[in-house]
Amino acid sequence: MSEYQYFEFRAIDEPLDQRAQRDLRGISSRASITATSFTNIYSWGSLKADPAEMLARWFDAFLHVTNWGTRWLAFRIRRGALTEDDQSPYEVEVFSSQDEGQHTCLHFARQDEDPGDWVDGEEWLGSLLPLRDALGAGDLRCLYLAWLVDVQLGCVDEEEEEPPVPPGLSELDAAHEAFVEFMQVDRDLLAVAAEASSALAPAGPSRDATLAWLAASAARTRTDGSSRSSKATAPGFAGRSASACAMSSAPPPAKRGSVAPAETWSSAPIRSPTNARDDRSESVPSDEGRRRSAEQQHASVTWTSSWAASTRSGPRSTS
């Protein structure tokens, strides 16, 4: 029987630039190389580079299958997404990890002495790729499933303590089911473990949804800032005294022992005592208007000074 080796790498977060593709072409003259992938099948010879080093340097996912029993899946995720305490209980033979700069490479590999029926590698990586996001979000099910493979291969002593059983083993999604198939996890062992596994917590917003919300929030902030800036130069603001403008832009002091909700200052217009008097003085005769204007300026300066003093001195004791 001729040899069969399948290698596939995927770049997910960032495409490969031209220099990277040239470097990869130096590794293999026959491989299919694009801005997001490197794929090759060998019936003789082998890859002229270390796959683990290629993953750490250029790629985010890797799969290797041979017809003599090798099944190797690996992902590169953000360093710190899984801590050492998360990983170490599951590291025996099948699962291993390596920190590489700003990333951590997670490897799942088994080698069977009697591989039996082997499968082509082309059909696997696409269905397994969602596991990278799950691992990056702290999902430990793949690590536990790899530990189960260690158990069935006889790599775990009976005296060794079982690692934590993660939630969700009884509700595997399509990607985790593909992992069970690819790593040939014993279904009976999995069923026993699932009995001790709690239900998955409701999923929070995805990373993409969170980034989209942050971008929209930043855009609204910029729009609100532009609106306030245009108001400040409008004709209606030109005649205000400096103290009145200071009053309209500064938050009024909160009551002692209380904190004003942030939403109040961001959504409700601040109406100062000066503004209220302005509304009532529209029909006042000119002499009376001048007298009230003087009173307004005096009141605004007094209010602003009191507020500034209370800010510098901090909240007063209520005792």
Image: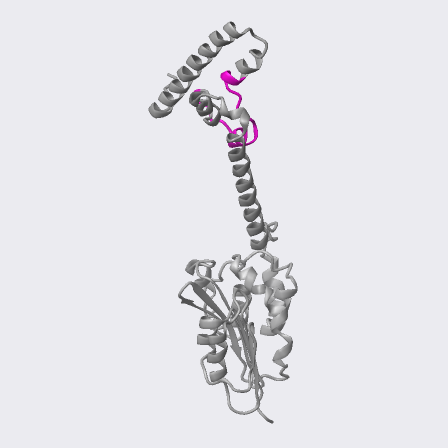
User: Residue at (48%, 72%) from the top-left corner?
Assistant: 58
Nearest to the observer: residue 13 or residue 136 = 13
Nearest to the observer: residue 66 or residue 13 = 13
Nearest to the observer: residue 231 or residue 219 = 231
Residue that extends furthest to the front in the rendered view of this protein: 286
Position of residue 317 measured from the top left corner of the image (x, y, whole percent) = 36, 19
Q: Is residue 17 above or below residue 199?
A: below
Q: Is residue 145 above or below residue 237?
A: below
User: Residue at (43%, 23%) from the top-left corner?
Assistant: 242
Q: Which quadrant of the figure contains the C terminus?
A: top left
Whether the magenta-drawn stretch holds residue 82 is answered as no
Position of residue 283 measured from the top left corner of the image (x, y, whole percent) = 59, 9
Nearest to the observer: residue 86 or residue 313 = 313
Residue bounds of the magenta highlight: 256-275
Position of residue 121 measured from the top left corner of the image (x, y, whole percent) = 61, 79
Q: Which quadrant of the figure contains the N terminus?
A: bottom right
Question: In which quarter of the view is residue 169 placed?
Answer: bottom right
* Residue 139 appearing in the image: yes
Position of residue 100 measured from the top left corner of the image (x, y, whole percent) = 41, 67
Q: Check the image and tell me how it is coloured.
A: one colour
